[in-house]
Image: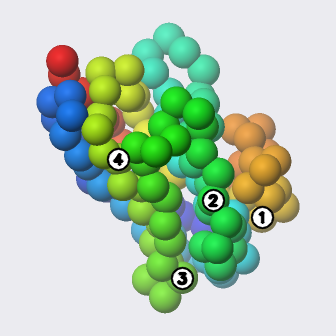
Amino acid sequence: QVQLVESGGGLVQAGDSLRLSCAASGGTFSTYVMGWFRQAPGKERKFVAAISWTGTNTRYADSVKGRFTISRDNVKNTVYLQMNSLKPEDTAVYYCAADKRASIATITSSSVDYWGQGTQVTVSS
């Protein structure tokens, strides 16, 4: 059983930056593909970014490409999401995800094994 705890969300203005963190415990962190998803009110949970076991490979949703960066520290068992040039449409609850079987190319909200509790990100215009 893997526990994921996100932190770093908050209220910012358009153009600002935020860094989300997700601390993992209870499993072998380095064997999981890690990802970030987000869910806006009344909408489905959507993929944002994913990172491979070693951190060598990453994938991003088109809507955040060039603005967000996912990274991981397998010593600290933590995955990060650096969000720059934030826009009001980035407002959502952001969820950390751990997937044992998927690759960064195939991870979806249906394949994820473990979820964090979510952290709210609100971007005002």
Q: Amino acid at mark 2?
A: Thr
Residue occupied by mark 3: 74
Residue occupied by mark 1: 100
Q: Which element is circle 1 on?
A: loop
Query: Mark 2 to mark 3: distance in Å?
Result: 15 Å
**Residue 75, which numbered label?**
none
Residue 98 at what x, y percent from top left? 64, 59
Query: Mark 3 to mark 4: distance in Å?
Result: 20 Å
Answer with mark 2 or mark 3, whichever residue precedes in sequence. 2
Towards the viewer: 113 or 105: 105
Residue occupied by mark 2: 58
Towards the viewer: 119 or 19: 19
Vertical placement of residue 109 versus 27, above or below: above
Residue at 37% across, 61% down = 21
Query: Mark 3 to mark 1: distance in Å?
Result: 15 Å
Vertical placement of residue 20 versus 94, above or below: below
Contact between labelled residues 4 and 1, with CB atoms less than 8 Å apart = no
- Quadrant, the C terminus: top left
Q: Which element is circle 4 on?
A: strand
| Side of 119 relative to 62 (left or right) | left
Answer with mark 2 or mark 1, whichever residue precedes in sequence. 2
Which callout, 1 or 4, points to the residue nearer the camera? 4
Q: In the orientation shown, which residue stands out farthest toward the front? A: 66
**Residue 83, which numbered label?**
4
Quarter occupied by residue 56: bottom right
